[in-house]
Image (cartoon, coloured by chain):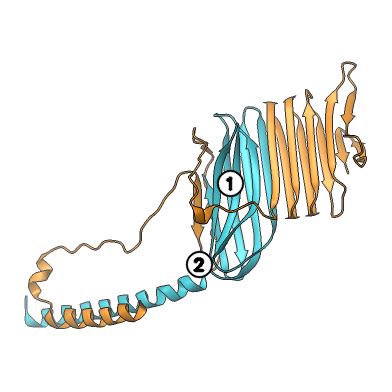
Chain colours: A cyan, B orange
């Protein structure tokens, strides 16, 4: 390998490392700005399934949520849509909405939670 | 932490730019991800990294036999507060239940016991609305419960009498709900 090639490769690597460092410094700032997260907590409650729509935030936020749960089985189909406003304090987590479904082993469900807040939007699904 | 990272990057850049030997290019380089992927059964978690809604859809998947229970850690053990609640119990065949709640502190329970082809819709819009509806041994009955803001609680059991007539039961002392028949549908207000 010639000296010119070696120098060129060194320069390219230097640029790559500097760009990576710049991105690494920018990432935490982005993460701090978007502080909200969501979660669907699923638990068995006797012969039923309980789904809790949960939101958490590292900063104080306000927003709107929508929680959709669909279930199908031999006994029938159900569709639950719950929505409303929410507000979260710093470093807090809150149950926004709860749905309980009577279920047998053959039933299928699908849940989706969407949060729209002044800190951005996030969604999560279960299962 | 950020200062440390910056310093490390500067140092690393200087080292790479000055002392990198051509021999290193003969070796394949591998880098591990800086992110740790965590997954837990029975719960899904979404962390916002973009400013637009994430449109993630999943297909219907069988419920895990264990019900998807996850052991809650102390920091995730929170009481139920101020949200809407909807409960659905269907026993029978080919029934359909729709529950739509907008607002806060609304509660709705629908139970279909031994029903076939029954359709129930509960629409709540407001705060602190309550509806408890049970259908027992019915076939092909359509019931709509409409609760705009300020509506009194609806507590109702509907069953079919041996003579074929519908029997609508409400607890003693409960505010009487208005039941209107529209076509093949009972509308409860």
Work out which quarter of the rendered image holds the N terminus of chain B and state it: bottom left
Q: Which mark is residue B50?
A: 2
Residue A56 drawn above or below residue A23: above
CA gap between label 2 and label 1 equals 21 Å
Q: Is residue B53 visible?
A: no
Crowding around mark 2 (Cα neighbors within 10 Å: few <14, some 14 to 19, many 20+) is some
Q: Describe the element under mark 1 as helix, strand or loop.
A: strand
Task: Using the image as rendered, state which of residue B146 and residue A5 is in the foreground.
Answer: B146
Quarter of the image where one finds residue A78: top right
Residue sitting at x 10%, y 66%: B26
Name the residue carrying label 1.
Answer: A111
Residues under numbered marks 2 and 1 in contact, where contact means CB atoms less than 8 Å apart: no
Question: Measured from the top left, where is residue B120 in percent x and y?
Answer: 77, 36
Q: Chain of mark 1?
A: A
Residue A120 drawn above or below residue A99: below
Task: Using the image as rendered, state which of residue A59 and residue B36 is in the foreground.
Answer: A59
Residue sitting at x 85%, y 45%: B153
Question: Measured from the top left, where is residue B47 in percent x and y?
Answer: 49, 61
Using residue B103 as the reference point, say whether residue A8 is left or right of it.
Answer: left
Question: Measured from the top left, where is residue B188 in percent x and y?
Answer: 87, 40
Using residue B96 as the reference point, say whether residue A52 is left or right of it.
Answer: left
Crowding around mark 1 (Cα neighbors within 10 Å: few <14, some 14 to 19, many 20+) is many
Q: Is residue A62 visible?
A: yes
Number of marks? 2
Work out which quarter of the rendered image holds the C terminus of chain B and state it: top right
Q: Chain of mark 2?
A: B
């Amino acid at each position: 390998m010639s000296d010119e090639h070696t120098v060129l490769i060194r320069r390219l690597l230097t640029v790559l490392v500097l760009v990576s460092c710049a991105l690494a410094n920018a990432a935490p700032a982005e993460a701090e700005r978007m502080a909200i997260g969501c979660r669907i907590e699923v638990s068995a409650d006797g012969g039923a399934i309980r789904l809790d729509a949960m939101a958490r935030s590292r900063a104080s936020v306000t927003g709107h949520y929508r929680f959709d749960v669909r279930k199908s089985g031999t006994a029938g189909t159900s569709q639950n849509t719950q929505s409303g406003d929410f507000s979260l304090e710093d470093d807090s987590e809150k149950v926004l909405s709860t749905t309980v479904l009577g279920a047998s082993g053959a039933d299928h469900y699908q849940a989706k939670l969407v949060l729209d807040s002044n800190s951005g939007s996030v969604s999560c699904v279960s299962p | 932490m950020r200062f440390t990272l910056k310093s490390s990057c500067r140092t690393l850049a200087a080292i790479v730019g000055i002392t990198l030997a051509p021999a290193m290019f003969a070796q394949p380089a591998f880098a591990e991800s800086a992110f740790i992927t965590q997954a837990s059964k029975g719960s899904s978690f979404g962390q916002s990294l973009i400013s637009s809604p994430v449109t993630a859809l999943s297909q219907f998947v069988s419920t895990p036999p264990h019900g998807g229970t996850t052991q809650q850690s102390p920091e995730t053990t929170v009481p139920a507060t101020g949200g809407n609640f909807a409960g659905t119990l269907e026993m029978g065949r080919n029934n359909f239940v729709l529950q739509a709640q907008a607002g806060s502190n609304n509660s709705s329970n629908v139970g279909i016991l031994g029903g076939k082809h029954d359709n129930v819709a509960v629409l709540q819009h407001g705060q602190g609305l309550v509806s408890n509806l049970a259908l027992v041994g019915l076939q092909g009955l359509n019931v709509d419960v409409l609760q705009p803001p300020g509506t009194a609680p609806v507590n109702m059991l509907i069953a079919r009498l041996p003579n074929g007539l519908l029997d609508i039961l409400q607890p003693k002392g409960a505010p009487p709900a208005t039941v209107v028949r529209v076509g093949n549908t009972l509308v409860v207000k």
